[in-house]
Amino acid sequence: MHKNGTLSIMDNNVLKENIYIQSVTLNGKPYFRNYLRHEDIFSDNTKLAFKMGKTSNKKQGCAVADLPPSHNFNQHFQLAFEQSHSNRIV
C-alpha cells in the first residue's frame, strides 16, 4: 500500500529529435535501473526526471545490477551481458 502523495514526472530537453533517455533521477538522485520499483515511486512525494537527447546513452542502465530481478538470476546470462557491455564504467 502506498502513502498519499504525488508522483511528478518531469522531462528535460524534450524536443522531437530527442528520443533517447540520457539520464534519470529519482528525488534528485541518479537512477540507473531499467525498471521502477513500487516502493520507489509510491512513497510520499516522488519526483522522477528524465533528461533526453539525440543519441542513446550506452552507459545508462547497462550494469547487471540495473536489470530487473527476473533477469538477474542466471549467472551465464550475467556473464554474457557483462562481456557485451564491458565498455561501461561502473
Image (cartoon, rainbow, N blue to C red):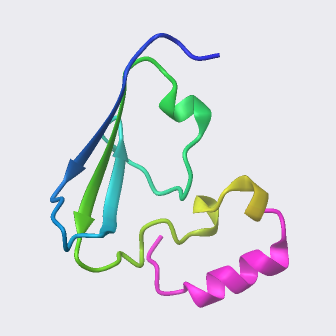
In the displayed structure, 24 sits above or below 59; it is above
Q: Residue at x 74, y 81 (%)?
A: 79
Task: Tell me where residue 65 sits by quadrant.
Answer: bottom right
In this view, the residue in front, 85 or 14, is: 14
Q: Which residues are magenta?
A: 72-90
Task: Tell me where residue 36 sits by quadrant.
Answer: top right
Q: Residue at x 58, y 60 (%)?
A: 66
Q: Residue at x 75, y 64 (%)?
A: 71
Q: Is residue 80 left or right of residue 25?
A: right
In this view, the residue in front, 29 or 35, is: 35
Q: How many marks?
A: 0
In the displayed structure, 86 sits above or below 48; it is below
In the displayed structure, 31 sits above or below 67; it is above
Q: Is residue 38 left or right of residue 54?
A: right
Q: Is residue 41 left or right of residue 16?
A: right
Task: Point out the image quarter for the N terminus.
Answer: top right
Residue 85 placement (x, y as % from top left): 55, 84
In the displayed structure, 49 sits above or below 89; it is above
Magenta region includes residue 86: yes
Q: Which residue extends farthest top?
A: 4
Q: Residue at x 25, y 57 (%)?
A: 51
Residue 84 placement (x, y as % from top left): 60, 89
Q: Which residue extends farthest front?
A: 16
Magenta region includes residue 81: yes
Q: Is residue 16 left or right of residue 81?
A: left
In this view, the residue in front, 64 or 22, is: 22
